[in-house]
Amino acid sequence: MVNTGDRIELEYNGKKLEGILMPRVELMSKDITVLKLDNGYNIGMRNSKIKNVKVIEKYSSKKEDKPKSISKNPRLPNVPILSFGGTISSKIDYRTGGVYADYTAEDFVEMEPALKSIANIEAKKILSIMSEDAAWKEWKLIAAAIHKEVSRDDVDGIVCTVGTDTMHYITAAISFFLKNLNKPVIFTASQRSIDRGSSDAFMNLKCAVNAAANFDGAVVATCMHGTTNDDYCLLIRGTKVRKMHTSRRDAFRPINEKALAKVYVDGKIEIINNKYQKKSEVSGSKCILDAKYEDKVGLIMQHPGLDPEIIDFYISRGYKGLVIAATALGHVAVHGDISLVDVLKKAVKKGIPVVIATQTIYGAVNPYVYTNLRKLSLEIGCIFVHDTLAETAYSKLGYVLAHAKDMDEVKEMMQSNLRGEINDRHLIEDFLN
């Protein structure tokens, strides 16, 4: 009798294959058998073409013994790894195909032994969710967990593992929540699951630990593949990063500025943008957790034919602020039945800030180039936020509204460069960097 999780050998189309029998995917035909090969990839086979199945080893649910505890090296930096979910923090049971987030420091070192030569590792599981399920409540928990570790005198830097889908929202929010940050807080993840031969998890984790241990910046940053190959990882400011591809390993790119550094697997850190706060500049300062947040903030994309009633819906539901990802320099419809002029005036008169960012991703909004833009800025009072990414503006507005007392203060804070989210100078080479 062959069961899920058994190691088996079989013939398929005349070729011998060996691997772990996986559970059938719910949406897959019942005529398909899935085998996990030793190279980490799964293969689906039609049952009618499978012959001579032989069980090599029966599956046992007995838990594997944990490796021995890791002894600390007093000469190495101390780097906690905080797990908030995502593929990189999930352990794959190759026998059943199940995923569970339960890594310890020993697991990380077993997964990537080179880590113990970089830093003394601790690992703590805080959350176990996909990043698309994380919002402001989870962002606060993440910030509090990071702040607890940052406040320790014996910690040199923090690594945080999360899911990739909304990592750029998370890193922006955490950048605002941690005032006077005095150590590097490095977010990493994986685009491809750990059980795949092309997984980026191991290199990302190694480079992230290296950055947390040795980077001289006191900043929130992401550390992910810089190319589709295993060349280096890019350290990117948390308020200037965006996921730009669904599946590429180098999906995370710096927007409107260079990445802070290239991080190599051999431990080298090559600074390519030195405009960041250095640890030496804030030596002795105390990081402050400031995670007050107004969650009633909407993010709306301007598109042809956008119904003004959409804005009315947000107003009627008691939203306290709106970010519009406008076209190009900050345009929205201002003529005809789809004009947003009246409804935006209504919002602003009710004390609801309307923040204008661009959906082009690169470049900056400008309220003075066209007459229609002047109407939004000067007549209605919309707040143009230069080159702040729409996602960063969304995270920032919730933070600002929890601290500002009136519209003028909201405008001043949104147009101020609090955590490197606004860059007044754009170089040619920053585009599609």
Image: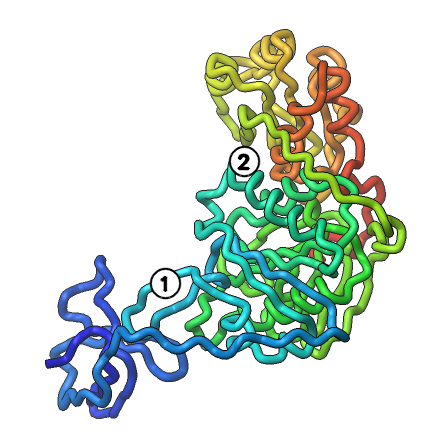
Residue type at mark 2 is Trp
Name the image quarter holding the N terminus: bottom left
Judge whether residue 107 can be spotted in this image: yes
Front position in the image: 250 or 129: 129
Q: Which residue is mark 2?
A: 136
Residue 352: x, y in percent?
62, 15
Q: Taking 119 as reference, is 174 above or below it?
A: above
| Quarter of the figure with residue 359 | top right
In this picture, residue 229 sits left or right of residue 183? left
Q: Taking 114 as reference, is 285 above or below it?
A: above
Residue 23: x, y in percent?
23, 68
Mark 1: secondary structure: strand
What residue sits 78% from the left and 26% below the top?
A: 369
| Quarter of the figure with residue 331 | top right
Judge the density around disc 2: few (<14), some (14-19), many (≥20) Cα neighbours within 10 Å: some
Judge whether residue 327 can be spotted in this image: no
In this picture, residue 50 sits left or right of residue 278? left
What residue sits 62% from the left and 56% below the top?
A: 187
Q: Earlier in the sequence, mark 1 or mark 2?
A: 1
What residue sits 65% from the left and 29% below the top?
A: 397
Residue 35: x, y in percent?
27, 77
Q: Which residue is mark 1?
A: 99
Residue type at mark 1 is Val
In this picture, residue 217 sits left or right of residue 294? right
